[in-house]
Image (spheres, rainbow, N blue to C red):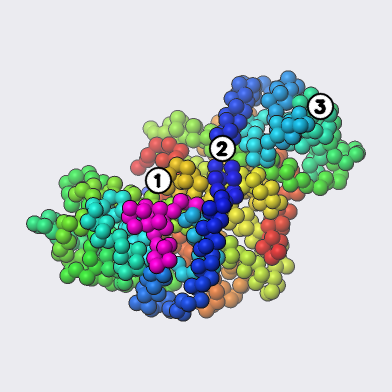
C-alpha cells in the first residue's frame, strides 16, 4: 500500500500545473448558466486548449487519438484542474466520457476516424439519448423503434432527460430494432445527427429553474445504417461498456471540489457565529471524515484499475452510493451554516444544494445501485 | 501511486486468517463464550507468528514491518473476534518484557476502561493508572472490563488498530448477513431476494468499503486527522453492520446461540476506546479551519 506518487507522476503534475497557471488567466469570462450557446462555445474552447496542449482524451487509448495516460495520471489531471479552478468538461461530458469511449471500443475504423477527432478537438458535442418516458431504471424496456429501410434506419419515438440536447451535434441513441426479441436482445446503438429532419428538442426546466435537459422527439428520422456502432440488436452490450465508464472516474474532480467547499463552509461558520454550535462542528467534522475517505477510495479504485487495467468495475457503484449521499449531506450542512440565507438563490451553495438532489437519481438511482451491489458484488439472488 | 495490497501484504493476511480459522474458529469461539478466560497457548502462538512484534525492528528481534501490516493483522483479529488485550500487548512489544513473544499478557487503560485487567500480567502506561479500578459486568462475554476514575490520554496508533478491528467486524458482519440471506427461505424464496434485505446488505458493504479506504490510508500516512476519520467511519461501519446483520438473521440473531450478538457487543466495546466519537469529530472540524 503506497500513497506516494512516482517521480514520473510528480513530473506530470508539475508540467500540468505550470501549463494551467499560464493558460487559465487567458480564458474568457464564464458565461451565464442560462446561455446555452455561450456555454457550448466556452466548454469547447477549453477543450480546444487542452487538445492543443496535448491533454485531450488523456485517458483514451492512443490508437483512438488519446494520450493513453495511466489511471493515476488521469486522477492527477482531474485533481489539478479542479484545484486550479479550470473549467469543467461541461458540454463535452457525453462525448469525452460516454460516446467517445464507446466508439473507441466498439466502432469501426471509419467510425473512429469520423467521430473521435472532433470530440477531442472540441468541435462536436454529443448527448445521450437512452432514457424514455417509460424506460428509466428499466432502461432495456425502451420502445423507440427503428425500422430498416434500405441503407437507413427509420426511427420513431421519444427520449427524455437528455442533457445538453439543445446544443448537441450528435446523440448516442438506443433504439429497438427487434420488438419480438427478449428485451435486452433487440436493442441497437446509433449515432443520430441532431439536425436530421424529424428531430424535435423541447427543453425541460429542472427544479433549479434552468433548462439542463430536454425531451427529444423522433418522427420518422432517417439514420444511415453506417451510423450503427456494433451489430444490430447488440446495442445493450455496447451500452454497458458506456455505462461502466459513467460509473468509474467521473466524480474525481467533484470530490476535490466538495473538500474545498467543506473548508469554505467551516470558515463561513466561524465568521457568522455558527461555529460556536458543537452540533454543527461535529456535523462538519464527520463530513470531513467522509470526504477524506471518499478521496482515498478514489485512489484505491484508480490503483485497482491501474493494476487490473481495462474498464472500471461495479466498485463504482459502491463509490457512487456513498458519494451521492455525502454530497447531499454537504449541501444540507451548508444550509445549516447559512440559516435563513439558505433560501436565497443568490447565495453561494443554494443552487448546488438543489442540483445535489439529482445525484441519487441520475446515472442509476441509489436503489438501482444497491441492487447492483447486492446482486453483482455480494451475489444475492435476483428478485422480482 | 499503488494504493493496493502488495503480494506480501496479501500473504500476511492469508496466513493470519488461516491461523485464526484453525485456532479460533466457530467451535473455539463458542467454547470461549462458555468458559471465559484467556487462552495463553493461543497468545503464545500469536507471539510466535509475530502478531505482537510485527512493528518491532528486526534488530530488536521483531518482524520489522509497519502500520499497514499491523492494520491488516488487526483486521483479521477483529473478524475472528479474537479475545484479549491485543492492542495493548502489541503496543507494549519491545517495551514490556515478554510482550513481543506473547509470553506476557499486557493491558492498558484506554479511555475510562481497562480490558482483561484480572488476567493481565502487566498494566502498561502511567504507574498506578489502573489503581482502584472497579470491575463491571461486561456486556461482551469475551471482554472483561474494569472502570477507572481518570481517563488515559488517547493514543492515535491504538485508535487506528481499533479501527482496523472494527473494519474486520464490519466485513464479517456483511459476510454473515449475506450467507444467511442466501440460504434462509421465506415466502418460497431466499430472503436475500427481497429488496429490503438486499439493500441492508448493500449498505453494509458500502460502509465497510469506505471505511477500509480510510483505515488503510491512515495506516500509510499515520496522520492523526486521517486516523480520526478512519476511526469514526470504522466504528460506524462495525456498529451499524453488526446491528443490520442481526436484523437479517431475524429471531435467530437475537439468540445467545448465534454469534451475531458477539460482533455487535465487541463493536460496542471497541467504540468506547480512546476519546470516543466527539473527540474525533472535533479534531476533524478543527482541521477544516486549521
Ligand atoms: C439531472 C439528470 C440528468 C440526466 N441526464 C440524462 C441523459 O443525458 N440521458 C439519459 O438518457 N438519461 C438522463 N437522465 C435520466 C436518468 O438516467 C433517469 O432519471 C434514471 O435512470 C431514473 O429513471 P426514471 O427517472 O425513469 O425513474 P424511475 O425508474 O421511474 O424510478 C422512480 C423511483 O423508483 C425506484 N425504482 C425503479 N426501479 C426500481 C427497482 N427495480 N428497485 C427499486 N427501486 C426502483 C427508483 O430508484 C426511483 O426512486 C438524467 C437524469 C437526471 C436527474
The answer to whether tags 3 and 2 share a subunit is: yes
Magenta range: A51-72
The answer to whether tags 1 and 2 share a subunit is: no
Count of numbered labels shown in the rendering = 3
Quarter of the figure with residue A212: bottom left
Q: Are the two marked residues, 3 and 2, in contact with CB atoms closer than 8 angstroms?
A: no
Residue located at (69% from left, 74% from top): A271
Front residue of B47 and A22: A22
Magenta stretch: includes residue A66: yes
Q: Position of residue A49 (x, y in %)?
A: 41, 70
Quadrant of the rendering where the N terminus of chain A is positioned: top right
Numbered tag placed on residue B6 in the rendering: 2
Neighbor class of circle 2 (other Cα within 10 Å; few <14, some 14-19, many 20+) is: few
Up-down relation of residue B230 to residue A359 (above or below): above
- The reply to whether residue A85 is in sight is no
Q: Position of residue A110 (x, y in %)?
A: 22, 56
The CB of the residue at mark 2 lies under 8 Å from ligand 1: no
Amino acid at each position: 500500500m503506497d500513497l506516494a506518487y512516482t517521480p514520473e507522476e510528480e513530473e506530470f503534475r508539475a508540467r500540468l500545473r505550470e501549463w494551467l497557471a499560464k493558460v487559465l488567466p487567458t480564458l474568457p469570462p464564464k458565461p451565464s448558466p442560462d446561455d446555452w450557446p455561450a456555454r457550448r462555445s466556452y466548454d469547447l474552447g477549453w477543450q480546444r486548449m487542452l487538445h492543443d496542449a496535448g491533454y485531450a482524451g488523456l485517458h483514451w487509448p492512443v490508437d483512438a487519438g488519446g494520450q493513453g495516460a495511466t489511471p493515476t495520471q488521469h486522477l492527477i489531471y482531474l485533481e489539478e484542474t479542479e484545484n486550479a479552478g479550470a473549467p469543467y468538461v461541461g458540454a463535452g461530458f457525453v462525448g469525452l466520457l460516454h460516446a467517445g469511449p464507446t466508439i473507441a471500443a466498439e466502432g469501426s475504423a471509419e467510425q473512429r476516424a469520423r467521430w473521435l477527432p472532433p470530440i477531442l478537438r472540441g468541435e462536436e458535442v454529443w448527448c445521450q439519448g437512452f432514457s424514455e418516458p417509460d424506460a428509466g431504471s428499466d432502461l432495456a424496456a425502451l420502445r423507440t423503434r427503428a425500422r430498416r429501410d434500405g441503407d437507413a434506419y427509420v426511427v420513431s419515438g421519444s427520449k427524455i432527460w437528455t442533457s445538453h440536447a439543445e446544443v448537441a451535434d450528435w446523440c448516442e441513441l438506443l433504439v429497438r430494432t427487434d420488438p419480438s426479441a427478449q428485451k435486452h436482445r433487440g436493442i441497437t446503438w446509433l449515432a443520430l445527427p441532431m439536425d436530421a429532419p424529424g428531430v424535435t428538442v423541447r427543453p425541460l426546466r429542472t427544479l433549479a429553474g434552468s433548462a439542463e435537459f430536454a425531451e427529444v422527439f423522433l418522427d420518422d428520422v432517417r439514420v444511415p445504417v453506417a451510423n450503427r456502432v456494433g451489430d444490430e440488436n447488440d446495442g445493450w452490450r455496447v451500452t454497458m461498456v458506456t455505462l461502466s465508464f459513467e460509473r468509474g472516474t467521473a466524480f474525481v474532480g467533484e470530490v476535490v471540489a466538495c473538500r474545498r467547499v467543506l473548508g469554505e463552509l467551516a470558515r463561513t461558520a466561524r465568521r457568522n457565529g455558527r461555529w460556536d454550535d458543537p452540533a454543527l462542528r461535529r456535523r462538519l467534522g464527520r463530513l470531513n471524515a467522509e470526504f477524506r475517505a471518499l478521496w482515498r477510495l478514489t485512489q484505491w479504485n484508480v490503483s485497482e484499475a491501474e493494476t487490473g487495467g481495462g474498464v472500471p468495475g461495479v466498485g463504482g457503484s459502491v463509490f457512487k452510493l456513498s458519494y451521492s449521499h455525502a454530497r447531499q449531506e454537504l449541501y444540507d450542512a451548508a444550509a445549516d451554516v447559512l440559516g435563513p440565507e439558505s433560501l436565497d438563490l443568490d447565495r453561494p451553495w443554494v443552487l448546488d444544494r438543489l442540483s445535489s438532489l439529482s445525484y441519487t437519481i441520475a446515472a442509476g438511482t441509489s436503489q438501482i445501485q444497491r441492487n447492483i451491489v447486492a446482486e453483482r458484488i455480494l451475489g444475492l439472488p435476483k428478485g422480482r | 501511486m499503488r494504493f493496493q495490497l502488495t503480494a506480501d501484504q496479501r500473504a500476511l493476511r492469508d496466513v493470519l486468517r488461516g491461523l485464526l480459522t484453525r485456532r479460533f474458529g466457530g467451535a473455539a469461539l463458542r467454547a470461549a463464550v462458555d468458559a471465559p478466560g484467556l487462552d495463553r497457548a493461543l497468545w503464545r502462538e500469536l507471539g510466535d507468528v509475530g502478531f505482537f512484534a510485527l512493528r518491532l525492528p528486526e534488530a530488536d528481534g521483531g518482524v520489522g514491518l509497519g502500520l499497514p501490516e499491523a492494520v491488516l493483522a488487526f483486521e483479521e483479529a477483529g473478524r475472528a473476534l479474537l479475545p484479549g488485550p491485543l492492542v495493548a500487548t502489541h503496543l507494549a512489544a519491545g517495551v514490556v518484557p515478554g510482550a513481543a513473544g506473547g509470553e506476557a499478557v499486557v493491558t492498558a487503560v484506554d479511555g475510562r476502561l481497562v480490558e482483561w485487567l484480572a488476567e493481565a500480567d502487566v498494566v502498561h502506561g502511567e504507574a498506578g493508572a489502573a489503581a482502584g479500578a472497579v470491575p463491571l459486568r461486561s456486556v461482551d462475554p469475551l471482554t472483561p472490563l474494569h472502570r477507572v476514575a481518570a481517563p488515559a490520554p488517547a493514543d492515535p496508533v491504538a485508535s487506528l488498530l481499533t479501527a482496523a478491528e472494527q473494519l474486520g467486524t464490519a466485513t464479517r458482519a456483511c459476510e454473515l448477513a449475506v450467507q444467511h440471506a442466501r440460504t434462509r427461505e421465506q415466502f418460497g424464496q431466499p430472503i436475500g431476494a427481497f429488496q429490503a434485505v438486499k439493500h441492508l446488505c448493500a449498505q453494509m458493504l458500502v460502509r465497510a468499503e469506505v471505511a477500509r479506504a480510510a483505515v488503510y490510508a491512515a495506516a500509510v500516512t499515520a496522520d492523526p486527522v486521517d486516523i480520526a476519520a478512519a476511526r469514526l467511519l470504522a466504528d460506524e461501519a462495525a456498529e451499524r453492520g453488526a446491528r443490520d446483520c442481526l436484523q437479517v438473521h431475524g429471531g435467530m440473531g437475537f439468540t445467545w446461540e448465534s454469534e451475531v450478538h458477539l460482533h455487535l457487543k465487541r463493536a460496542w466495546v471497541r467504540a468506547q476506546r480512546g476519546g470516543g466519537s466527539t473527540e474525533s469529530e472535533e479534531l476533524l472540524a478543527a482541521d477544516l479551519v486549521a
